[in-house]
């Protein structure tokens, strides 16, 4: 079975400072991993995905994530936070058979002026 | 990419009644899924909607409570039956090609409140 753990339920940063959202996964095979973002009262939007190609993945809005197999981690980062980044972020591991998604518990990112 | 719409966007229902949620994709997708997001929680997969056959349910979810239809490759419905306040959640559908590397697209969700 596969699972994903987001290590922080809430992260608070100041505008212009770096963002780090942590995610660890468990899988018996080399997984596909995604990060989704959910803004208040909006649908889920894919930020980026890792699919066994380059370990450093760049996504939309300046976000990137690095797949580290030795640490079973897929942390999401952004060099400089913007107010519009305030949202809930989900780390997701994908079932390779049918594309079923297993979601982490989510991290709520708050950005202060 | 695919654009997914859901109807209704929200509803308030009485205990004991049923609600059917529709999910429409603007292009054919191999796989469609239904998720539940309870207040303050993450998304939990309810079932895989299979075209032309019975849905595949995850542990803890049963067909009598959440009957699902998928008559073609662009449309699916989820019914929440005999509702109780514990069913108050956001219900989301998603669709994708079914390959693990492919993006899965989500509908905007249906916010259900059961009184």
Image (tube, rainbow, N blue to C red):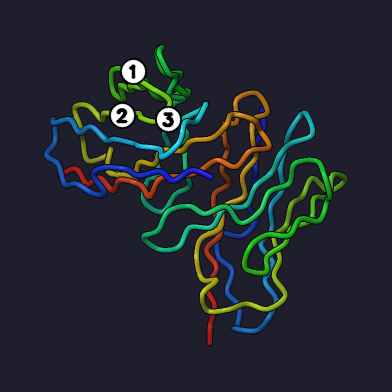
Judge by depth and name the residue closer to the eye, A98 or B29: B29
Judge by depth and name the residue closer to the eye, A11 or A95: A95
What residue is pinned by disc 2?
B77
What residue is pinned by disc 3?
B46
Question: Could you tell me which residue is drawn at 13 percent across and 31 percent down?
Answer: B17
Residue A77 picture quarter = bottom right
Question: Could you tell me which residue is drawn at 70 percent across and 76 percent down?
Answer: A18
What residue is pinned by disc 1?
B63
Q: In this rendering, would A2 be left or right of B115?
A: right
Question: Could you tell me which residue is drawn at 80 percent across and 41 percent down?
Answer: A52
Q: In this rendering, would B63 be left or right of A57?
A: left
Chain identity of mark 3 = B
Question: Where the C terminus of chain B falls, by quadrant?
Answer: top left
Label 3 packing within 10 angstroms: few (<14), some (14-19), many (20+): many
Question: Could you tell me which residue is drawn at 29 percent across and 35 percent down?
Answer: B22
Give percent across and percent down for residue B35: 42, 37
SS label for mark 3 = strand
Chain identity of mark 1 = B
Which numbered marker is on residue B92? Answer: none
Q: Nearer the viewer, mark 1 or mark 2?
A: 2
Along the polypeptide, which appears first: circle 1 or circle 3?
3
């Amino acid at each position: 079975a596969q699972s994903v753990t987001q290590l922080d339920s809430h992260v608070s940063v100041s505008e212009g400072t770096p963002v780090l959202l942590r995610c660890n996964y468990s899988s018996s095979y080399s997984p596909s991993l995604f990060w989704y973002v959910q803004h208040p009262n909006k649908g889920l939007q894919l930020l980026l995905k890792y699919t066994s190609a380059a370990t450093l993945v760049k996504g939309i809005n300046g976000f990137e994530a690095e797949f580290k197999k030795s640490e079973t981690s897929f942390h999401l980062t952004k060099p400089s936070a913007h107010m519009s980044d305030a949202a809930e972020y989900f780390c997701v591991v994908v079932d390779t058979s049918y594309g079923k998604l297993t979601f982490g518990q989510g991290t709520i990112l708050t950005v202060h002026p | 990419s695919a654009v997914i719409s859901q109807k209704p966007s929200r509803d308030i229902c009485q205990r004991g009644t049923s609600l059917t949620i529709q999910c429409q994709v603007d292009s054919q997708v191999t796989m469609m899924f239904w998720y539940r997001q309870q207040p303050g929680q993450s998304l939990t997969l309810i079932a895989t909607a299979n075209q032309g056959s019975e849905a595949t349910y995850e542990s803890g979810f049963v067909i009598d409570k959440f009957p699902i239809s998928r008559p073609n490759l662009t449309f699916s419905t989820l019914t929440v039956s005999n509702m109780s306040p514990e069913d108050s959640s956001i219900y989301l559908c998603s669709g994708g090609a079914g390959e693990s590397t492919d993006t899965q697209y989500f509908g905007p969700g249906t916010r259900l409140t059961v009184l």
